[in-house]
Amino acid sequence: MAAESQPQLIEERREEQELKYLEFVQFATIQALMRCAILYSYAKERAGPLKPGVNTVEEAVKTVVAPVYDRFHLVPGEVLKYADRKVAELDRHVPSNVKKVSSQARSVVSEVRRDGVSAYAKIVYSKYEPTAEQCAVSAWRKLNQLPLFPQVANVVLPKAAYCTEKYNEAVVSSAEKGYRVSAYLPLVPTEKIAKVFGGN
């Protein structure tokens, strides 16, 4: 009986330690600290002639900060757990539609963590692109009803098309030359834009 209750007790303690609502704060803090540590070590490696001075300052800071850290290093985690418990208490009083939005936001965060930002952006783009196209066409039609807009559009559109064509050529050319930045630059879908707005 005692052997069965011990794993259960360990599991309950582990669940107590986990954050239910504010886990993202802990995750973001850890990520930020890791990035700062990497940046600091990079700067320290390239300190050149200042390296002995940097080491001296680092040792002095460690000497002063270490006792304070040893005494208070658990406080931020405890404050976060306390805040998480308070959020749990507030959760009982929150309307169901707000909880639904919150759960959707959590699912978005978990998808972004799992698949990455670019994969999630592609999913969102494919989901909302038709709606955005419809809104753009509707706005275009409304603008065309204004008195001077068609004349201005006839002057501006050829220049915009030319600039867009040059931009696309530059992106394709940089990709062919192997520049990494070209992977992050999107091509402007001129054919698609012409097709969508062609009837107007």
Image (tube, grey):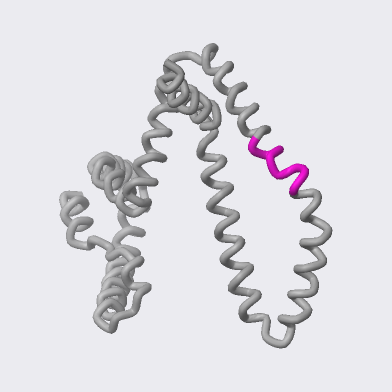
Residue 75 colored magenta?
yes
Residue 193 position, x and y percent, is: 22, 56
Where is residue 32, by image quadrant?
A: bottom right
The answer to which of 45 and 59 lies nearer the viewer is: 59
The answer to which of 160 and 52 lies nearer the viewer is: 52
Residue 5 colored magenta?
no
Q: Residue at x 40, y 20 (%)?
A: 4
Q: Is residue 186 visible?
A: yes
Q: Residue at x 24, y 80 (%)?
A: 176
Residue 103 position, x and y percent, is: 41, 27
Please give the count of numbered marks on the rendered protein: 0
Where is residue 168, by image quadrant?
A: bottom left
* Secondary structure that dominates the magenta span: helix
Q: Quadrant of the N terminus?
A: top left
Q: Is residue 158 above or below residue 77?
A: below
Q: Is residue 145 visible?
A: no
Q: Residue at x 53, y 18 (%)?
A: 91
Q: Is residue 82 above or below residue 184?
A: above
Residue 73 position, x and y percent, is: 70, 44
Is 38 on the left-hand or right-hand side of 199? right
Is 93 on the left-hand or right-hand side of 169? right
Residue 197 position, x and y percent, is: 21, 52
The answer to which of 87 and 9 lies nearer the viewer is: 9
Residue stretch rendered in magenta on the structure: 70-77
Residue lying furthest bottom in this view? 49
